[in-house]
Image: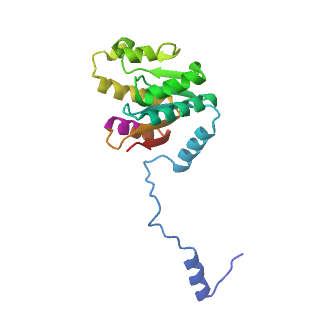
């Protein structure tokens, strides 16, 4: 069945279906299907237990550290696993303290180098942590280089990244970008 419209009605019908595309995001043929990507992110969010990486700055006021500690405790109490790196102060230390309060078995600490290469206060903080991965193979690397590799390893093991950083933190910005490329669910808190 075909409906014929007068010229005036055809013009009106055509005008009513015109959609401006100037403001829409462009998807090129090389990018993954946006719908599949969204479906994967929604599935990750809906998971009852996730592997959540918490990374961030060492230079944090005590109030921020307390918030991160509380967040890590709450996430573990909900059944999630926290993955972080070692640190005597700041984000990683707060995440470790929080996860240890709730359930030490739900904490995984990946060190950039060996335990022996960590400062004594970090070594002391790791006492009682059941899941520690250390990298003696990175002994000759600078801590900065080993940390970059460590951040990528942590992100590879997680479903979601929570990152606390300043706008000038190049290493952490690189970690967030790496997580974006890996299609992780990301939450970023800027501290400045």
Residue occupying the far right of the picture: 1
Q: Main secondary structure of the magenta part?
A: helix
Q: At 60% from the left edge and 32% from the top edge, which residue is drawn?
A: 74
Magenta run includes residue 12: no
Up the image or down, 17 lies above or below 33; here it is: below
Up the image or down, 3 lies above or below 47; here it is: below
Give the image location of residue 104, x and y in percent.
57, 19
- Residue closer to the observer: 137 or 19: 137
9 relative position to 34: left or right? right
Up the image or down, 30 lies above or below 6; here it is: above
- Magenta range is 170-175
Q: Quadrant of residue 2?
A: bottom right
Q: At 33% from the left edge and 17% from the top edge, which residue is drawn?
A: 138
Q: Quadrant of residue 27?
A: bottom left
- Residue closer to the observer: 24 or 12: 24
Give the image location of residue 45, x and y in percent.
59, 40
Magenta run includes residue 172: yes
Number of numbered labels in the structure image: 0
Give the image location of residue 31, x and y in percent.
44, 48
- Quadrant location of the N terminus in the rendered image: bottom right
Q: At 48% from the left edge and 37% from the top edge, which residue is drawn?
A: 162
Q: At 52% from the left edge and 70% from the top edge, which residue is drawn?
A: 19
- Residue closer to the observer: 182 or 168: 168
82 relative position to 145: left or right? right
Residue occupying the far front of the picture: 62
């Amino acid at each position: 069945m075909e409906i014929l419209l007068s010229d005036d009605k055809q013009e009106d019908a055509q005008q009513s279906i015109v959609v401006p595309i100037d403001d829409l995001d462009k998807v090129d043929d090389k990018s993954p299907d946006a719908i599949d990507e969204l479906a994967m992110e929604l599935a990750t969010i809906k998971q009852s237990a996730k592997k959540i990486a918490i990374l961030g700055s060492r230079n944090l006021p005590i109030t921020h550290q307390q918030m991160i500690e509380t967040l890590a405790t709450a996430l573990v109490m909900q059944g999630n696993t926290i993955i972080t790196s070692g640190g005597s102060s700041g984000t990683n230390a707060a995440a470790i303290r929080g996860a240890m309060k709730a359930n030490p078995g739900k904490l995984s600490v990946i060190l950039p180098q060996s335990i022996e290469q960590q400062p004594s206060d970090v070594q002391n903080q790791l006492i009682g942590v059941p899941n520690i991965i250390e990298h003696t193979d990175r002994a000759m690397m600078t801590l900065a280089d080993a940390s970059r590799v460590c951040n990528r390893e942590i992100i590879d093991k997680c479903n979601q990244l929570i990152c606390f950083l300043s706008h000038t933190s190049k290493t952490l910005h690189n970690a967030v970008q790496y997580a974006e490329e890996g299609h992780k669910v990301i939450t970023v808190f800027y501290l400045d």
